[in-house]
C-alpha cells in the first residue's frame, strides 16, 4: 500500500495537502521506524517558504523493495526501471529477512 501526501505550511492561509510521503505496510516490512530526515519548520527550512523539504528520493525506497523482495538487480534498477538514477542508492533494510 502506498499513500502520498504533503502538508503545505503557510500561516497566512489554510493548510493544504499534496503528494510527497510514502508508507510501506505488509507482513514482510521491517517496520517500527520512520526513515528520512526532519528538516524543521522554520521559514528557512521550508521549501519555497511553505512546504516541508523533501529529504529522501522515493526512488530509493522503491529500489529497495524491488531489490530486496523481487531480486531486481541494481544495474536493472538504475538503467531500466529508473533510468539515469545511478546516484540514488536503495534504502537498506526495508523488508525483513
Image: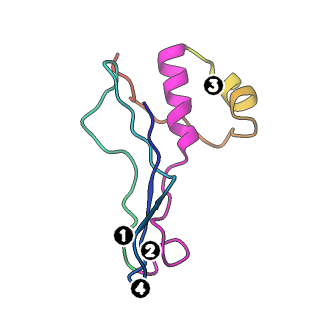
Q: Residues within 10 Å of mark 1 (few under 14, many from 20)?
A: few
Cβ atoms at labels 1 and 3 below 8 Å apart: no
The region drawn magenta spans: 43-70
Q: Residues within 10 Å of mark 4 (few under 14, many from 20)?
A: few
- The image shows residue 50, relative to residue 61, as above or below, that is below
Quadrant (top left/top right/bottom left/bottom right) for the N terminus = top left
Whole-angstrom CA distance, mark 4 to mark 2, is: 17 Å
Q: Secondary structure at mark 2?
A: loop
Q: Which mark is residue 12?
A: 4
Q: Earlier in the sequence, mark 1 or mark 3?
A: 1
Q: Which mark is residue 74?
A: 3
Q: Which residue is mark 2?
A: 45
Cβ atoms at labels 1 and 4 below 8 Å apart: no
Whole-angstrom CA distance, mark 1 to mark 4, is: 19 Å
Residue 7 is situated, as x and y percent measured from the top left of the image, at: 42, 62
Residue 25 is situated, as x and y percent measured from the top left of the image, at: 35, 29
Amino acid at each position: 500500500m502506498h499513500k502520498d501526501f504533503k502538508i503545505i505550511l503557510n500561516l497566512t492561509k489554510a493548510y493544504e495537502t499534496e503528494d510527497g510521503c510514502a508508507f510501506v505496510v505488509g507482513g514482510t516490512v521491517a517496520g517500527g521506524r520512520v526513515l528520512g530526515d526532519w528538516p524543521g519548520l522554520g521559514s528557512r527550512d521550508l521549501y519555497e517558504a511553505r512546504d516541508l523539504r523533501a529529504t529522501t528520493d522515493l526512488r530509493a525506497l522503491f529500489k529497495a523493495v524491488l531489490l530486496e523482495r523481487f531480486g531486481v538487480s541494481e544495474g536493472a534498477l538504475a538503467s531500466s526501471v529508473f533510468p539515469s538514477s545511478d546516484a540514488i542508492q536503495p534504502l537498506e533494510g526495508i523488508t525483513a529477512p
